[in-house]
Image (cartoon, helix red, strand yellow):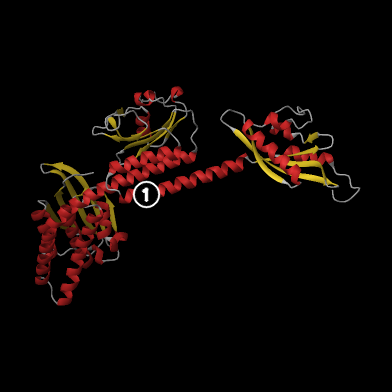
Amino acid sequence: MSEQGARPDLESFRSALDAGVVGMWSWDLRSNRLTWSTNLDTFHGRPESGADGTLSIIPQDFPSQDAGGVIAAIHKSLQTHEPCRLEYRLPGRSEHEERWFEALVTVIVQDGEATQMLGMCRDVTERLRINREVGVRARQQETLARLGERALTETDLQKFFKEVVATVGEILDVELVKILELLPGDAELLLRAGVGWQAGLVGTANVSTGRESLAGYALASGRPVIVEELASETRFSGSQLLHDHGVVSSITTPIAGRDGRAYGVIGAHTGKRRRFHDYDVSFLAAVANVVAGAIQRRQLDQRHELMIRELRHRSGNLFSQLLALFSQTAKNSRSVADLVLKYEARVLALANAHRLITEGGWKSTSLNELLNTLLAPFLDRISFNGPNVFLEPDPTFGLSMAVHELATNASKHGSLSDPAGRVDLTWLVTRTQQGLTLVLDWKESRGPAPKRSRRPGFGSRLINMVIERQLNGQVQQTFTPKGSQTRLVLPLAHKQ
């Protein structure tokens, strides 16, 4: 209290101290007596009022490496009469833990002589833990950024793997790091790269993919696996490779591959018992993603080389097809404007199919995606029902032309020319003498009655040409009072 003669509410003050994490102490320099709030006993891990009231509380409770610094700071403050701030450690509840405290010390001076020292202590363990964690995470993020850059520029995967395992070992402070590659047959993993392993094992050692091994368990679970003590682990026994190297604690996480098949695993191991933090696990999982990206980039480079060769072969055919399409469209057009309208629409259908194929790496294209792209203007009046089939480039081009012509004819003369008209589009995959075959049915309803006597136009002839001649398929068209129906049957290279 600053007001002279006012009596402080000692009981309220003491209750406030006991309820918090702040402790107060006072050292009377004349009598060399020390008094303190009761929660300081708890801080120092001693029974309440277990100290003898002398300054011996400091060397008894502080670790030897910290006691000297604490005493030196207090003596300096006594000499200079300046306040000081210091941090010190105290033992935690277990050998793996420790607590940190901050002390603010003030010297009371009377007639030029230090007569009393007042101190306030508070537990700053959580604050320092957070600061330490922020620093560690910042370093991990910097490392991930650097590895990400290397993944984009390094063309030698083995060289990149060596850099990755060395970096992980340094950042996580572990002795052993490995990258295991899943071998064909999925029964074994090869030690593709690593640090800390016995000479001659990298490139030759194999680990089982069975769930009894840590790597196999990680592959099966599809997520990071943390081991605090391998000897007491109940989920798996661990590979002989780990036991031979005295592994106690570890983190292992899968490395993603293509088409749902994992590439392998990356693991960090230590011979000391250690509790890995969540941010350590997140860091290793992020490294696994970077490695997966580097692998996929290299595979994409190889695929692009194949695509270039394929495009060279197909470009000539595509130009010939466009010229033939123009010639036939011109013969069946009433005017230049009619020619432009029809030809632009047909080329756009080819372009959309080409875009889907190239975006898929010149591999298979989803039939659902193709139909949604081609029939986008009519999706509110067309129903789809069928499995998610994937088409090779040739069937994709042919079917895109056929579906475009069906939609064009329906919008001019069939059900899509009437606001109430509908189209039901269904398909299935069946096995015939030609192998796996796609059967697609286009059924129109609620539109004008089809004109059976109308001479087939170029659109109908184009459907027959691309399905029957180019793809060795079949076209069946029927006309009912409800609307026209068309069945397209075409062989598939493969179905996913």
Residue 44, given in percent of the width and then of the height, sits at: 69, 32
Q: Is residue 76 above or below residue 339?
A: above
Tell me where residue 136 appears, x and y as whole percent: 50, 43
Front-most of residues 25 and 83: 83
Residue 377, located in which quarter of the rendered image? Answer: bottom left
Q: Is residue 250 above or below residue 336?
A: above
Residue picked out by circle 1: 148
Question: SS at mark 1?
Answer: helix
Can you give x and y, in whole percent of width and height, for residue 427 in the image?
A: 22, 49
Which quadrant of the structure image shows residue 481? bottom left
Question: Where in the figure is residue 176, as x and y percent of width and height?
Answer: 39, 32
Q: Residue furthest right?
A: 5
Res. 455 in view: no
Asked whether, in this view, residue 407 is left or right of residue 24, the answer is left
Question: Residue at 16% across / 46% down in the picture?
Answer: 493
- Quarter location, residue 406: bottom left
Is residue 106 shown left or right of residue 439?
right
Viewed as shown, does residue 284 lie left or right of 468? right
In the image, what residue type sits under mark 1? Gly
Name the residue at 49% across, 39% down.
Answer: 278
Q: Nearer the viewer, residue 376 or 155?
A: 155
